Image (tube, coloured by chain):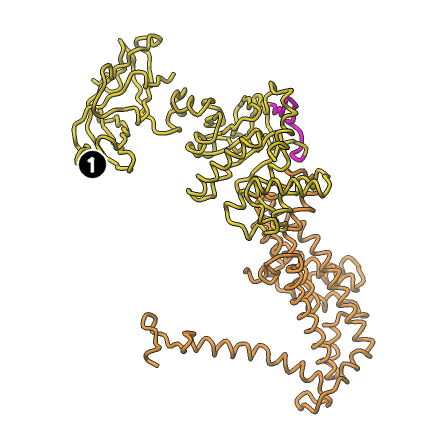
Amino acid sequence: MTDQISAATGASDVTSQTPAIELIGLTKKFGDTTVVDHLSLDIRRGEFFSLLGPSGCGKTTTLRMIAGFSDATEGRILLGGQDVTSVQPHKRNVNTVFQSYALFDHLDVEGNVGFGLKRKGLDKSEISRRVNDMLELVDLGGRKSAKPRELSGGQKQRVALARALVNRPEVLLLDEPLAALDLKLRHRMQVELKEIQREVGITFVFVTHDQDEALTLSDRIAIMNNGVIEQCGTPEDVYERPKTVFAAGFIGTSNLMTGTYSAGAVTVAPGLRVELPGHPELIDGSTASIAIRPEKIWIADFEPDMVRVHGTVAATVYHGATTQYLVNISPEIQLTVVEQNLVRSHHDDRWSDGDSVEIGWKPEHVVVIG
Amino acid sequence: MASETVPTTGRRRSVEGKPTFAVAFTALFLFVLYVPIVVVVLFSFNSKKSLSVFGGFSTRWYQDFFNDEGLLSSLRASLFISTVTMLCSIVLGTMLALALERVTSRPARITGTVALIPLVTPEIVTGVAALLFFTGLGMKLSLTTVIIAEITFSISYVAVIVRGRLSSMSDEVEEAARDLGCTPFQALRLVVLPTILPALIAAGLLIFALVFDDFILAFFTTGIDPQPLSVRIYSEIRMTISPAINAVGTCMLLVSVLLISLSLVVPRLLGRKDSSLDLISGG
C-alpha cells in the first residue's frame, strides 16, 4: 500500500526542487471587498502545510482558488510548476476534503471512494484494488457497502479523506475537515491524519482556525489575517518568534506590551519601565512591542539575571496540571502567568486574588516585535 | 381507573397509556374519510342498477366501462395528458429549481416567489386565463391546450419539491464531483440528479395524480373530442347516472393506489431508505 503511493509520488522526486504549489500575487475580490490580497507563497512537496486564521481571513477562499472552485481576480497559481490559474477544477491534479464531507448519498462507501478513479477510466479490478487498499488505510475495510447515512461523523470524515487520497493527487486540500467532530474524536483524527500524511507522502494543505490543530499537525503554518499572510514558518517559529502583533496574539496567549524604548528599558505605562537587555538594534525613542508567553513568566524562585516586575494577582484559575494567574502590573496592563502545579501543588501554597507578587522572566524569552 | 390517571397531566388514559379520546377521534376521522370510497368500490360490483341497494356481486359495470368507446378514449386521453405533463413539468421544474437554488440575485429571488404563485392562485382563475390566452392566440382547443395549461400549473409543484431536496444538499457535493473529475454536465448527471432522484419520483407521481383527476383546468381548456376522463364523467352524470361511473371511479382509485405504492417501492429498489412519501410528508 505504502509502496504504491510512494511510487506514484516518487516519480516527482526528479523535480523535487519545484514547489508543489506556488501562489504568485494571488488576489480575490468580491465586488469592492478584497478577500485575498496579493498573496505569494511556496508550498513544498510532501509538506503538511496549514493556512491558519480567524474566519473571514481569506484562508478558505485561497484553498478554493487552488482547487479551482473560485476564480482568481489577479495573480497566478502554479501546481508542480504548471500554471493552472485558468484550468477547470476537474482537470487539476488536486483533490479536496470538504468541511461538510460532501459524500454522495446515492452511492455506498465503495462507490464514493472509487468515484474519481472511475471518472479517470481505470479498469474495474484496478479500481477495486485501490479502493480496498485505501479503505484499509483509513480503517473502513468492513464498511464497503454502507451508505453515507449509515456512518458516524468520524467514519464519514474517513470516507471523504479516502475518496480524495485514492486518486493520488499532487496536493490534497483539506477545508477544516475536523471542525464538525467532537473534541475527543477530533484529537484522534488529528493523530490519524498526520500518520496517513506521513504514510502517503502527499502534500497536504490544511485550512483551520484552530491554532492547536495547526501547531500539532503542520510542518509549516501560514498565519493569515485580512487576506494577507502575517507570518509563515514552522510551528516553533510562529509560536516562539512571532513577527507581528497579530501573529503573537492569534497563536496561544501572548502578554503583549507596547511602549517607548530608551536606555535598555521600555516604558509600557506611565512610570513603569520594563527592562529589555540585549537589544542593541533598538534605537532610543523608538516604539517597541514586546511579547512573553505565559509559561515563560515565573512567579517565585527567580534565577539571577531575570527581569522582575511587581504586580497584584487579579484572578487565579486552577487547570489541574497548571494554574493560571492574571497579574496586574499597572491599572491597564494585565499579564497572564501559567505555572506548572509542581512545587505549589496544594491550594494553600498558591497565591490568591489580591496578593501582591513579583513576577519575572529570562531576557531571552522576550520577543521584540517590529 | 383512578390509579391509571397520570397525575402529572391529569388526563384520562387507557391502560396502555394512550389517550382514549385521540384513538376514538382518529377512528371516526378514518371512518368518515374512507367509507364513501368503500361504498363506491362496493357498488361498482353491484348486480343491480340501484345506487343504494346492493343486489349481489357482478362485474357488469366494468364490462360496460370497457365496452364504452367514449369512456375508453377519455381514459386514454387522460393518461396521455398526465404522462406528457409529468415528463415536461419534471424537466422544466427541475431546471427552474436548479436555477433558483443557484442564483442569488434580486431578480432571481423575485422570480422564485413569482414561480410559487400558481400554487395559491384559484384554479378557476388559471383556467379562465388559460382559455382567454388560447382563444386570443386563435388556438383550437384540444388535448394540446390542456397539456400546456397543466404544465404551466405543474412546474411550480415540481420546483417546490425539488428545491426542498436541493437545499438540503450542500453545494460542496457538486464541487466534490467536479473535484473528482466531472465536467459541470457530468456533475449534474452523475451526482446531482441521482441525489435528488427520490424528489423527482415523488414530484412525478404527485403531478401524475393531480393532473389525472384534475377537472377545472381540463374543463376550461379541452376541445370536444376526446375529452379528459374527469370532464367526460361530469358530462355523463349530467345526463344519466349510471353505476358504470362507480367502476370508472374504482379504476381511478386503483391507479392512485398503484402510484402511491410505486412511490414507496421504487426508491427502495434504488437502494434508498427514504421513500418519496417521506419527502411529501416532510419525514
Q: Is residue A82 magenta?
A: yes
Q: Is residue A68 magenta?
A: no
* Chain letter for the yellow part: A
Q: Which chain is disc 1 placed on? A: A
Front-most of residues A59 and A151 = A151
Compared with A107, A345 (above or below) is: above
Front-most of residues B115 and A53 = A53
Compared with B201, B60 (above or below) is: below
Where in the figure is residue A183, as x and y percent of width and height?
42, 42
Where in the figure is residue B23, as x and y percent of width and height?
47, 76
Front-most of residues B212 and B35 = B35
Q: Quadrant of the N terminus of chain A?
A: top right
Task: Please name the residue shown 49% across and 27% down the image.
Answer: A227
Compared with A142, A189 (above or below) is: above
Where in the figure is residue B228, as x and y percent of width and height?
75, 69
Q: Residues within 10 Å of mark 1 (few under 14, many from 20)?
A: few
* Chain letter for the orange part: B
The magenta stretch spans which residues? A76-90
Residue labelled with disc 1: A346
Where in the figure is residue A105, as x and y percent of width and height?
60, 50
Task: Please name the residue shown 21% across and 23% down the image.
Answer: A301
Compared with B56, A248 (above or below) is: above
Residue B123 appears in the rendering: yes
Indicate the quadrant where residue B74 lies.
Answer: bottom right
Indicate the quadrant where residue B144 lies.
Answer: bottom right
Q: Quadrant of the C terminus of chain A?
A: top left
Q: Amino acid at mark 1?
A: His
Front-most of residues A334 and A125 = A125
What secondary structure is marked by label 1?
loop
Task: Please name the residue shown 71% across and 60% down the image.
Answer: B86
- Is residue B265 left or right of A301 when viewed as pictured? right
Residue A31 appears in the rendering: no
